[in-house]
Image (spheres, rainbow, N blue to C red):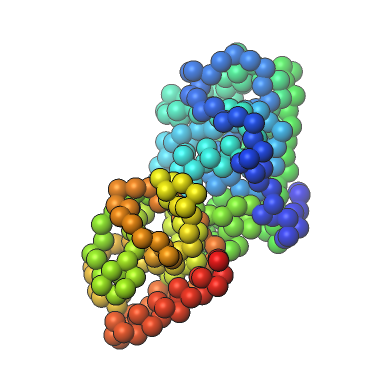
C-alpha cells in the first residue's frame, strides 16, 4: 500500500500547458492497432489511486456506462465524474489516447481470457498493462490481477492501493465525503478540485430580487452532488475565455427560507461578473464548505448572511 503525504495529495496533476498535443478519444472499434502501454479501469473521479495506475501509460482503457449499471443496476453508484469530466482529468496526466468500451450485456459476458485475447492483444496490441491491485474483469468479475499477470504477451504492472491521511483512496469513500459536504477532504483524495458541470437554467428570479443574481444548475440525477449548504467555488464559464473564471458563492439545496417545494438546485453567485449566461455551460470547482443550508425568519436576515458568505469567498479566493 502506498501512502501519500498530505501536502503532496494535490500536486499530482500534469499542468495543461505541459501537454504536447490533445489527447485522442476513441471507441474500442475505432482504435488503431499499435503497441501500447494501457492503463485499465473505470476511473470514476480520476483520484490519486487512479493516477498512480495511469502514470506512464500512453493509453487509458475505460468503460461507459459504469459496468455496475449493467450487471447490477440496483447497486449502481452515483458517479463523481461523467465521461466528459473524466476525459479532461485523464488528459492532464499526459495520456495520448482514451479508448472507451461501450459496456453492455454482451461485453459483460466475456470471459477474462476473451477480454485479454480479443481486446488487449488482438485489438490493442498491449505491450504493458497497468491496473490497480483490486482490479477485476470478465464475466462475474472472475478475472483478477494474478490471472492477468500470467499472460505472456505483455508485461503487467500492478499499482498498490494508495493511502491519504491513513485512509485508502477509493471512489466510494470520496462519494461519501462529497455527499457529506466535506469537499476539502474529497479534493485531497482526488488530487484536484471536485467539480460539477451543467447548462445554466432559469431559476425563480428570487436571487436577483435580493441583490444576488445566480447562475443555476439542476444536478444530474446520475451524479453525486455536495450535501445541502453554501460553498466557496471557482466558477468557470468556457465561453468567456480567460475572463470566465471567477470566485463564486454557491448554494446547494432547496431554499428553505422560501418554501419553494422544488428539488435540489445549485445556485451560483458569481462575484464581480455581469452578463446573460442562460443556456451556457458553467463549471463549478468546489473549494470549501462555509455552512449548512438553513431557514431564516426573514429575507433581511438571509441577505445579511449572504453578504457574509460572499465576503468570505472574496477573502478566500481573490
- Report the quarter where the C terminus lies: bottom right
- In the depicted view, which residue is nearer to us: 126 or 110? 126
Q: Is residue 123 left or right of residue 13?
A: left
Q: Is residue 278 above or below residue 153?
A: below
Q: Is residue 266 above or below residue 43?
A: below
User: Residue 158 at x, y = what percent?
Assistant: 73, 36
The answer to whether any part of residue 222 appears in the image is no
Q: Is residue 215 above or below residue 23?
A: below
User: Residue 249 at x, y = what percent?
Assistant: 44, 67
Q: Residue at x 45, y 79 (%)?
A: 308
User: Residue 15 at x, y = what percent?
Assistant: 65, 44
The answer to whether any part of residue 231 appears in the image is yes
Q: Residue at x 42, y 29 (%)?
A: 104
- In the depicted view, which residue is nearer to us: 197 or 256? 197
Q: Is residue 91 above or below residue 119?
A: below
Q: Residue at x 34, y 70 (%)?
A: 212
Q: How many dots with numbers?
A: 0
User: Residue 248 at x, y = what percent?
Assistant: 45, 64
Amino acid at each position: 500500500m502506498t501512502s501519500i503525504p498530505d501536502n503532496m495529495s494535490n500536486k499530482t496533476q500534469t499542468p495543461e500547458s505541459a501537454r504536447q498535443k490533445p489527447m485522442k478519444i476513441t471507441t474500442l472499434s475505432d482504435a488503431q492497432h499499435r503497441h501500447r502501454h494501457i492503463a485499465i479501469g473505470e476511473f470514476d473521479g480520476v483520484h490519486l489511486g487512479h493516477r498512480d495506475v495511469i502514470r506512464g501509460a500512453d493509453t487509458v482503457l475505460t468503460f461507459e456506462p459504469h459496468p455496475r449499471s449493467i450487471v447490477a443496476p440496483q447497486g449502481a453508484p452515483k458517479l463523481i465524474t461523467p465521461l466528459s469530466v473524466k476525459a479532461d482529468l485523464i488528459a492532464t496526466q499526459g495520456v495520448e489516447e482514451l479508448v472507451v468500451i461501450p459496456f453492455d450485456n454482451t461485453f459483460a459476458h466475456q470471459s477474462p481470457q476473451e477480454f485479454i485475447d480479443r481486446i488487449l492483444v488482438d485489438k490493442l496490441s498491449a505491450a504493458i498493462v497497468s491496473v490497480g491491485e483490486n482490479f477485476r474483469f470478465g464475466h462475474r468479475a472472475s478475472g483478477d490481477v494474478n490471472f492477468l499477470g500470467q499472460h505472456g504477451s505483455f508485461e503487467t504492472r500492478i499499482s498498490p492501493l494508495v493511502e491519504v491521511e491513513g485512509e485508502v483512496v477509493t471512489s466510494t469513500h470520496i462519494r461519501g465525503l462529497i455527499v457529506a459536504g466535506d469537499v476539502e477532504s474529497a479534493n485531497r483524495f482526488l488530487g484536484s478540485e471536485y467539480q460539477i458541470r451543467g447548462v445554466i437554467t432559469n431559476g425563480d428570479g428570487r436571487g436577483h430580487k435580493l441583490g444576488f443574481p445566480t447562475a443555476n444548475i439542476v444536478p444530474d440525477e446520475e451524479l453525486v452532488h455536495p450535501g445541502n449548504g453554501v460553498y466557496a467555488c471557482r466558477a468557470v464559464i468556457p465561453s468567456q475565455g480567460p475572463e470566465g473564471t471567477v470566485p463564486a458563492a454557491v448554494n446547494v439545496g432547496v431554499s428553505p427560507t422560501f418554501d419553494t417545494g422544488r428539488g435540489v438546485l445549485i445556485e451560483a453567485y458569481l462575484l464581480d461578473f455581469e452578463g446573460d449566461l442562460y443556456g451556457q455551460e458553467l463549471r463549478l470547482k468546489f473549494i470549501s464548505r462555509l455552512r449548512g443550508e438553513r431557514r431564516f425568519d426573514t429575507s433581511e436576515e438571509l441577505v445579511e448572511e449572504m453578504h457574509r458568505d460572499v465576503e468570505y469567498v472574496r477573502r478566500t479566493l481573490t
